[in-house]
Image (cartoon, rainbow, N blue to C red):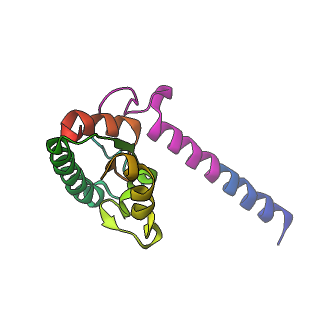
Amino acid sequence: MPTDALEDLMHQKAHAQKSRAKARRSKHHRGGVPPEPADAPVLRTAWSTRLVPHNEFMGPWERCHAMLVNDARAYRATGRPQIALLGDSITESWRGTGLCRKLGRCQGVPGVLQATLGARWPQPTVLGIAADHTQHLLWRLADGEL
């Protein structure tokens, strides 16, 4: 390949990488501030589901949230000593699920939870949804999960 063509190709590649990085920064953190502040309850938006089309992600997420609201209500009604685990996919793994669907990689994890924390607090409530950020957890708690 001629030297000029090779230099031109390398320049185009470097320019494309800079453009992609700039687009990521401007799309996700305009002015350095994320569109979903982590210190306030925020329902998931297209910004936080940018890796998957928003309309494809939100249906399963909303069904999972509704299921967790019902689980939390039922657990509160038992009157037993309680513990609730709050979080994202790592926490949700204690249920053996991801977006409230059974996951093979989590097989056996609910049994470990019952053998450990469940020995002290029978049937601990697990309120985790995969891919959630702090602001989404705050929103879920305000919307009935706790």
Most distant residue in the front direction:
119
Q: Which quadrant does the N terminus fall into?
A: bottom right
Name the spot of residue 40 as percent of width and height, x first: 33, 27
- Residue 36 image point, x, y percent: 37, 33
Image point (38%, 26%), residue name: 39
Nearest to the observer: residue 86 or residue 46 = 86
What is the tally of numbered marks visible in this picture?
0
Task: Give the magenta-colored segment's residue range.
Answer: 16-41
Q: Nearer the viewer, residue 55 or 26?
A: 55
Q: Tell me the quarter of the picture where residue 104 sits.
A: bottom left
Quadrant the C terminus occupies: top left
Residue placed furthest toward the right: 3
Q: Nearer the viewer, residue 53 or 98?
A: 98
Left or right of 135? Residue 15 is right
Q: Residue at x 58, y 45 (%)?
A: 21
Of residues 88 and 7, the one nearer the viewer is 88
Main SS category, magenta section: helix
Residue 107 highlighted magenta (yes or no):
no
Residue 120 picture location, percent across and down: 38, 46
Report x, y in % for residue 76: 18, 41
Q: Is residue 131 visible?
A: no
Q: Residue at horizontal 20%, vertical 51%?
A: 71
Residue 18 versus residue 39 in the image, above or below: below
Q: Quadrant of residue 47?
A: top left
Residue 146 seen from this side: yes
